[in-house]
Image: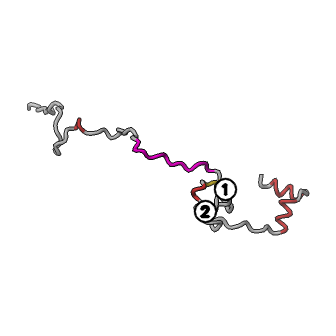
Amino acid sequence: MEKKTYHAPPHSKRRRDDGINESSKIPKAHIYPWISDGLDRHTLGNMDHECFDCGAMMWLDERVNVSTRSPVFDTCCAKGKVLPPLQELLPPLDSLLDEMDSTARLFVQSFS
């Protein structure tokens, strides 16, 4: 019995079904150069203002009040609502952390 072999036709530049020539399309990775239309770049300045409640560094434009001397921010901690204040330590635990007698030293070393 004779073996039949089939060969695919040679590749050719064909038009796609939608009529657009493959070579006329813009490559996906093409980046257009920025063209100025007269708009200036917007800058926020330095991030050098600290939230009074949580200590987050913020831009002045992120403040929720009009004061530039004591700005108030709420996008970081919702004016202190997100981070509750630390509770006072119980006296026995406070003395173990503050004093430096032998018991306190052993207590602190147990965490090291």
Q: Which numbered disc, 1 or 2, marks the residue closer to the eye?
A: 2
Give the magenta part as a residue range.
Answer: 36-47
Residue 76 in the image, given as x and y percentages of width and height: 60, 60
Where is mark 1, residue-wise? 50
Q: Quadrant of residue 29?
A: top left
At 17% from the left edge and 32% from the top edge, which residue is drawn? 12
Q: Is residue 105 left or right of residue 69?
A: right
From this view, report whether residue 23 is shown above or below residue 78.
above
Residue 34 in the image, given as x and y percentages of width and height: 40, 40
Where is mark 2, residue-wise? 66
Q: Is residue 37 left or right of residue 89?
A: left
From this view, report whether residue 108 is shown above or below residue 14.
below
Front residue of 22 and 107: 22
Tell me, yes or no, whether the highlighted magenta stretch contains residue 31: no
Q: Quadrant of residue 63?
A: bottom right
> Dot 1 lies on which element?
strand
Mark 2 neighbour class, 10 Å CA radius: few under 14, some 14 to 19, many 20 or more: few
Going by the picture, which residue comes out furthest to the front?
38
From this view, report whether residue 6 is shown above or below residue 89.
above
Front residue of 21 and 40: 40
Front residue of 37 and 16: 37
Task: Give the amino acid at mark 2.
Answer: Val
Front residue of 53 and 43: 43
Task: Give the amino acid at mark 1.
Answer: Glu
Residue 67 in the image, given as x and y percentages of width and height: 64, 61
Q: Quadrant of residue 50?
A: bottom right
